[in-house]
Image: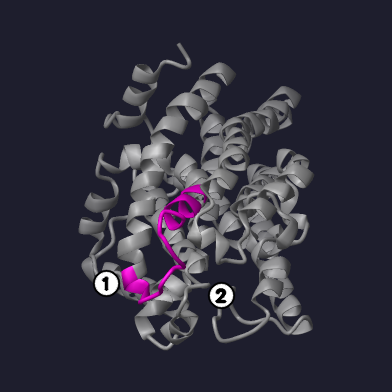
Amino acid sequence: MAFSLPRNSQRVFSLQREPDALLCLDALRFISFTWVASLHSVLFAAEADNAMQVFRESDYFFSSIILNAVWSVDTFFLISGLLVSYMFFKVASLSHCKVHKDPEHASSRRNWILYYVHRWLRLTPAYLLFIGIYVTWTPRMHGAWAIGTAQNTSYYVERCEDTWWMNVLYIQNFQSMNDMCYSISWFLSVDMQLYWIAPLFLLAIYYSWKTGFAAVLGGILLSTAAIVFLTAHFDLPATAFVIKEIGNVDFVSHIYVKPWTRCIPYLTGILCGYIIIQVQKKDIDIRRPKLMELIVCWLLAIASALTVIFSVYDYARGPVKTLLEHPLWYPLGRLSYCAYLTHWFLLHYLLNLGDGAVHFVAVSFQYLTITIPVVFLSSMLALVWTCLVEIPFMSIEG
């Protein structure tokens, strides 16, 4: 029954609200995935037959929304940290005692063994089996694009044949990007490594919220210091894909794919998860904000977003809540993990359907002709992969 396609499809497309679910997260997952796919679509066009147009694209102000989409992954890190913390403190709160006064919950060897085993079993079957699909089929999709690009798919396959075991252990981000099996898998490694160390912060908060807050703040400051030091020491650009600067590969190797430089949103998520539980338990009383307070907070959020990616949010709190918590996001959120796994493979497939090299027109054109088809196809393939692999192994583990 775990591998029943009708049953698993029904589970994916269910619009019923799950108890105690944080409803907006499905929307954030899927929107962030489309943002990631848009950046990868542009990267695959970087070796277009008119590559100078790609260089000129960085002169356009609004192109930064796509070209600087590298920070879209931070949304996933924030959600991961939030859910780890939320589930940990939710279990403690269900024991009908104060979160900070249940030593058995915090010291149970069985709980911590399951904590690590569950995470590996949750991610690995869908992940490694799809790498098998990638290694098997990518060499059979060679078209005009593959011939005219440095992104040689045969070399990609050879890398997986040599270093697949690092993917099993979730440590492939500690090797060169040029030697990594399935390039986008760096995210899964960083996410897993942050999951490994999360109990240090969870337990600190568990026994004393002041100590826990200090630990989280200390981690954020150390990570910030590491970024500043590495940027200065290796003379790195300010972000990963600055088209007109050299050093992008070094930025990726030293900062973009390392846990000590990507932990800030994860640690922030851990703190958010704890606060949400405290609000739900009424241990923290938050009054309904006044309209002016909402406006001020949204203006601050807009200013922060503009600073990072030059994009704005123009919704008040009510419309945002209605939009992000709509039930139609639930299936898309459930498919986001497998959609992320499959979209890199589908970019190879889609670009090799043409009869020549990629011709770059503009970021907006790339979004319409590559990103949207890839997101659609990824969602379709993700539905199959979720029902055939992800949900069955989740059920078996349970």
Q: Residue at 49%, 62% (x, y): give it.
A: 40
Q: Position of residue 163 (x, y in %)?
A: 77, 46
| Viewer-nearest residue: 106 or 147 | 147
Rendering quarter of residue 302: bottom left
Quadrant where the N terminus is found in the figure: top left
- Callout 1: few (<14), some (14-19), or many (20+) C-alpha neighbours within 10 Å? some
Mark linked to residue 295: 1
| Residue at mark 2 | 241
Amino acid type of the residue that numbered disc 2 sits on in the rendered structure: Phe
In the depicted structure, whether residue 392 falls above or below residue 28: above
In the depicted structure, whether residue 157 falls above or below residue 54: above
Looking at the rendered structure, the secondary structure element under dot 1 is helix
Q: Position of residue 236 (x, y in %)?
A: 69, 81
Looking at the rendered image, the disc whose residue lies closer to the viewer, 2 or 1, is: 2
In the depicted structure, whether residue 48 falls above or below residue 27: below
Please check the rendered image and state whether residue 218 is part of the magenta-colored stretch, yes or no.
Answer: no
Segment tinted magenta in the rendering: 345-365
Q: Position of residue 48 (x, y in %)?
A: 48, 73
